[in-house]
Image (cartoon, rainbow, N blue to C red):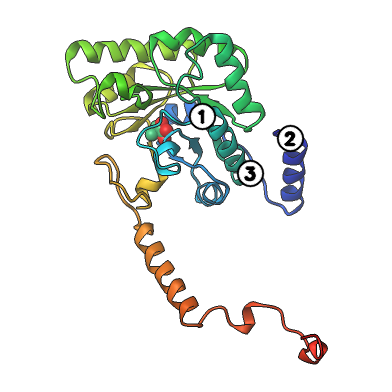
């Protein structure tokens, strides 16, 4: 269970060391849009990565159900459970001192009934420590978004290619290319904006449509494969760091090839252990060997 006391303890320790910590808020993201400041978002699924990303200045960390592929090795987000996301969110919260932590509501955790959705979102907040939740869908989920927001849970929307509908959509495809589909997406975006989302992910949406939506809603749009006209960008951290071995999506840019770095380092480790170059005496405690005399 997430404990406020332990966070306060961490906060007072940091304050005592003169480190000031102010958490990014959903309201600040809207202000960033108004000021024309772009919003970088990355996914995170564990403590160590969350610390690195937070310290590097990423203002929003998304505990995405993309963990289904990049962490758990599934071929879609569908098998991801609420428990998977709660546990990962709690780890990310422990690593994120400044970033706003948004947790994905997984497949079917918000579609059975609004009551169940509210309970599940509350678990992400109470047990995982999420500052906000994300869910997929347009007008059909707008009333639920309103209820969550009215209950004090900030919501990030997700339109365009919505990975939880992959069975319905028949594969990973750009959405909203035809005029009617584009108009539909615009209506969905407006409905979510009116329902109170604090930000809206647009995934695999053509650039001009993403730009149009961004100009027509108050909430910042966060694109992924949606071009440069969104108010921010989200990427799966494994993609930009070259950590996912299966494929590199077209919409990403690799800023590092950590997969290659890891393989080389691990090969060296294996050889060092096999060739008795590691560990050496300096990697363990010593003692007076005479104390062992007669023990054999
Ligand atoms: O699960 C996820 O990582 C996401 C982003 C790709 C937007 O939903």
Indicate which disc, 2 or 3, sits on the residue closer to the N terminus.
Answer: 2
In the image shown, does 73 or 60 lie closer to the viewer?
Answer: 73
Give the foreground label among 1 and 3. 1
Label 1 vs label 2: CA separation?
22 Å
In the image shown, does 34 or 41 lie closer to the viewer?
Answer: 41
Q: Position of residue 233 (x, y in %)?
A: 37, 36
Compared to residue 275, the image places residue 114 above or below, namely above
The tag on residue 3 is: 2
Displayed quadrant of residue 93 = top right
In the image shown, does 124 or 93 lie closer to the viewer?
Answer: 124
In the image shown, does 71 or 30 lie closer to the viewer?
Answer: 71
Indicate which disc, 1 or 3, sits on the residue closer to the N terminus.
Answer: 1
Secondary element under disc 1, as helix, strand or loop, is loop
Work out which quarter of the rendered image holds the C terminus and state it. Answer: bottom right
Give the foreground label among 1 and 2. 1
In this figure, which residue is indicated by the disc labeled 1? Answer: 81
Q: Is residue 291 left or right of residue 163?
A: right
Can residue 78 be seen in this snapshot? yes
Q: Quadrant of ligand 1?
A: top left
Indicate which disc, 1 or 2, sits on the residue closer to the N terminus.
Answer: 2
């Amino acid at each position: 269970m997430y404990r406020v006391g332990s966070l306060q303890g961490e906060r007072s320790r940091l304050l005592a060391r003169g480190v000031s910590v102010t958490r990014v808020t959903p309201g600040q993201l809207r202000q960033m849009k108004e000021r024309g400041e772009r919003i970088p978002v990355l996914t995170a699924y564990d403590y160590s990565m969350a610390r690195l990303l937070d310290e590097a200045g990423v203002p929003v960390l998304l505990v995405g159900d993309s963990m289904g592929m990049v962490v758990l090795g599934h071929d879609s987000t569908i098998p991801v459970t609420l428990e998977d996301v709660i546990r990962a969110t709690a780890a990310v919260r422990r690593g994120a001192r400044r970033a706003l932590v948004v947790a994905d509501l997984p497949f079917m955790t918000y579609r059975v009934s609004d009551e169940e959705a509210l309970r599940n979102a509350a678990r992400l907040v109470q047990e995982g420590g999420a500052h906000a939740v994300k869910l997929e869908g347009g007008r059909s989920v707008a009333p639920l978004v309103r209820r969550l927001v009215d209950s004090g849970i900030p919501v990030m929307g997700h339109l365009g290619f919505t990975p939880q509908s992959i069975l319905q959509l028949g594969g990973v495809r750009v959405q909203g290319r035809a005029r009617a589909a584009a108009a539909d997406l615009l209506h969905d975006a407006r409905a979510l904006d009116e329902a109170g989302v604090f930000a809206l992910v647009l995934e695999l949406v053509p650039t001009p449509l993403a730009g149009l939506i961004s100009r027509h809603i108050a909430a910042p749009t966060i694109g992924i494969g949606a071009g440069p006209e969104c108010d921010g960008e989200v990427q799966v951290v494994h993609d930009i760091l070259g950590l996912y071995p299966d494929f590199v999506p077209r919409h990403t840019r690799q800023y590092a090839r950590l997969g290659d770095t890891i393989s080389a380092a691990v090969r060296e480790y294996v050889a060092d252990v096999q060739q008795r170059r590691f560990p050496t005496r300096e990697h363990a405690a010593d003692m007076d060997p005479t104390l062992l005399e007669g023990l054999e």
